[in-house]
Image (tube, helix red, strand yellow):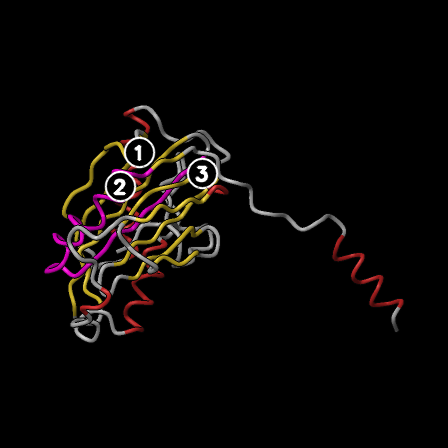
Amino acid sequence: MCTSGLTPARRPAEAVARLGQVPRPAPLLLILMALAAAGCGAERRGSPDSRVKEGAPSKAFVFPKVGMRFKAPVGNALRAAKKPGVFKIFLGEPVISAFAYRRREQVPKRRSELSAARRRLVGAVKERSRDYRLERSRITKVAAAPAIELLGSQTIARGRLRIRSLHVFKGRGEYVLELLAPKGEYDRANRVVFTPLLRSLKLTGKVDEPKKKAAGSKKKQKKRAEKGR
């Protein structure tokens, strides 16, 4: 199951291990639901044109508004995503999705803080999906920054998916990467696409604040509407 953040309203969309709070839902949930609706698994198998070939050239991608850049052999399969999403990559069966959050509170840095965040994240994931099976969770480093990794599997559209979720903490930002593929394809996808992407990943921790509507804009619109009557 995906882990990109659980909001206070418990939307099945984003899941972030927030320090001192229960993690928000999981962006992975949205991905899994989209895959199920599209018939991921048996229906999507056998699409050789979308598979990344061994030794395929990498392409550079830069997302300055969230302080992220990397290289990956994914051709034109990458699509920008709506905030807090950064991008989505559909390579037939393997899928990569990224999210970026600007944190108001201090992100976990110390081992004890990361351990507490990991426990909350694992608990939130298990609460969200009884079908999800956690294989392991650990504290690690990604892009030279502290991170929490969950590796597990879940059945979608009669197919078992292996899912690797990474929560990376840098500066005032929290980055979530979801990498998933059918169990039989996971090792190849990990070797050919996931690992090269993660090795080249660079993060600044500078995530732009979401744009806020100008104060009083609704009142101005109301006044204009009244004048036009």
Residue under label 1, please give it.
143
User: Residue placed at 17% from the left, 73% from the top?
Assistant: 42
**From which residue to which does the magenta span run?**
173-201
Mark closer to the chain start, 2 or 3 = 3
Real-space Cα separation, disc 1 to disc 2, in angstroms = 7 Å
Residue 34: percent from the left, percent from the top? 33, 67
User: Residues at badges 1 and 2 in contact (C-beta under 8 Å)?
Assistant: yes
User: Residue placed at 46% from the left, 50% from the top?
Assistant: 84
Residue under label 3, please give it.
67
Q: Is residue 84 left or right of residue 117?
A: right
User: Residue placed at 39% from the left, 50% from the top?
Assistant: 6
Mark closer to the chain start, 1 or 2 = 1
Vertical position of residue 42 compared to residue 144: above or below: below
Residue under label 2, please give it.
198
Q: Helix, strand or loop at disc 3?
A: loop
User: Residue placed at 20% from the left, 62% from the top?
Assistant: 51
Amino acid on which the number 2 mark rests in the picture: Leu
User: Residues at badges 2 and 3 in contact (C-beta under 8 Å)?
Assistant: no
Amino acid on which the number 1 mark rests in the picture: Ala
Real-space Cα separation, disc 2 to disc 3, in angstroms = 15 Å
Instruction: Point out the residue furthest to the left here.
Output: 184
Residue 95: percent from the left, percent from the top? 27, 58
Q: Helix, strand or loop at disc 2?
A: helix
Residue 205: percent from the left, percent from the top? 43, 33
Q: Is residue 164 left or right of residue 11?
A: left
